[in-house]
Amino acid sequence: MLTWLDELPAAVKPTEADIVALLARSLFEQGHDRVAYAFLLLRAEQHPKQTPLPTAPLVRRRTGQVVPWMGTKIARALEKAFRATGYPPDPLPRLVEKITQRVFGLGRPVVELETIQDLVIEALLLEELWDVARAYALYRAKRAQERLEAARQAPLQLSLLEVVEPNGTVTFWDGQELRARLAYALEGLQVNLSSTAIENALRKSLYSGISRGKPAKKPSCSTRRPSWNTTQTLRSWPEGSS
């Protein structure tokens, strides 16, 4: 799982909630259920109780859109988790009420959707509904991976970088030269990183609008050849290349 995250393009940035969901799934898949439950409870504890507001909070979706609070959506999500595990849905009304009070008790006028999901899992675990909590967490990880995969398959144009040349003109760089140099440098070597992972590590030290030859933070990519950084690579590219 960590390798998969490391190989995501630099333009694809998983949220903290995405990483938490994928780490929890990894723990479940390795049979460390108790560790996963403890990990998820600790995550929920990062949302301490405050003085409740007199009105219902708004909910901020991942897209940034802010929508009204709707407890029925929590009920539907929980119902799917109960159905997936074969548990009778009798505790649903009580759970929805507890989760609603917990969210309102944050004292925030706007609550992130990921925060609500953390508190849903917390409520299930405190009720000792282990299998339902596991099903909910696994579905959450599945959705996180699907979003990241969709972003990963986005058109190449999204990862183009603007490079300011010495004469002040701007060219667009798509990384083809870097990939070619990596293929040559890694030929015949046995390294513990893929060329994609190394490319992503190098790209993280670059940004749109960088000047050709401007120092960039040196990434830590371990190979058996002398290390080199993106500054040296950028300086050696032909002027005006794109």
Image (tube, rainbow, N blue to C red):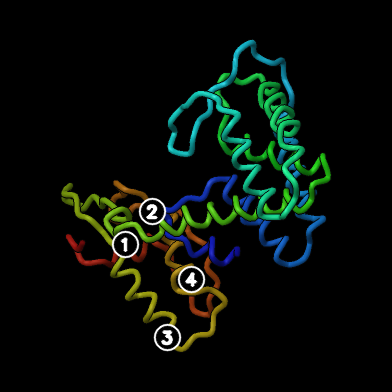
Whether the residues at callouts 3 and 2 have beta carbons within 8 Å, the answer is no
Residue at screen point 17% across, 60% down: 240
Residue type highlighted by circle 2: Leu
Residue 91 in the image: state x and y as whole percent. 76, 37
Q: Which mark is residue 187?
A: 3
Instruction: For marks 1 and 3, give the CA distance.
Output: 21 Å
N-terminal of the pair, mark 1 or mark 3, is 3
Q: Quadrant of the C terminus?
A: bottom left
Q: Secondary structure at mark 4?
A: loop
Q: Residues within 10 Å of mark 1 (few under 14, many from 20)?
A: many
127 or 37: nearer the viewer: 127
Decide if residue 45 is in sight here.
yes
Residue at label 1? Answer: 234
Residue type highlighted by circle 4: Ser
Question: Up-down: is 112 above or below 204?
Answer: above
Instruction: For marks 3 and 2, give the CA distance.
Output: 24 Å
Instruction: For marks 2 and 1, give the CA distance.
Output: 10 Å
Question: Up-down: is 221 above or below 120?
Answer: below
Residue type highlighted by circle 1: Leu
Residue type highlighted by circle 3: Glu
Residue at label 2? Answer: 206
Question: Up-down: is 147 above or below 232?
Answer: above
Residue at label 4? Answer: 227
Decide if residue 216 is in sight here.
no
User: Would residue 164 appear left or right of 4 to someone viewing this image?
Assistant: left
Residue at screen point 35% across, 72% down: 179
User: Would residue 19 appear left or right of 146 to someone viewing this image?
Assistant: right
Front disc: 3 or 4: 3
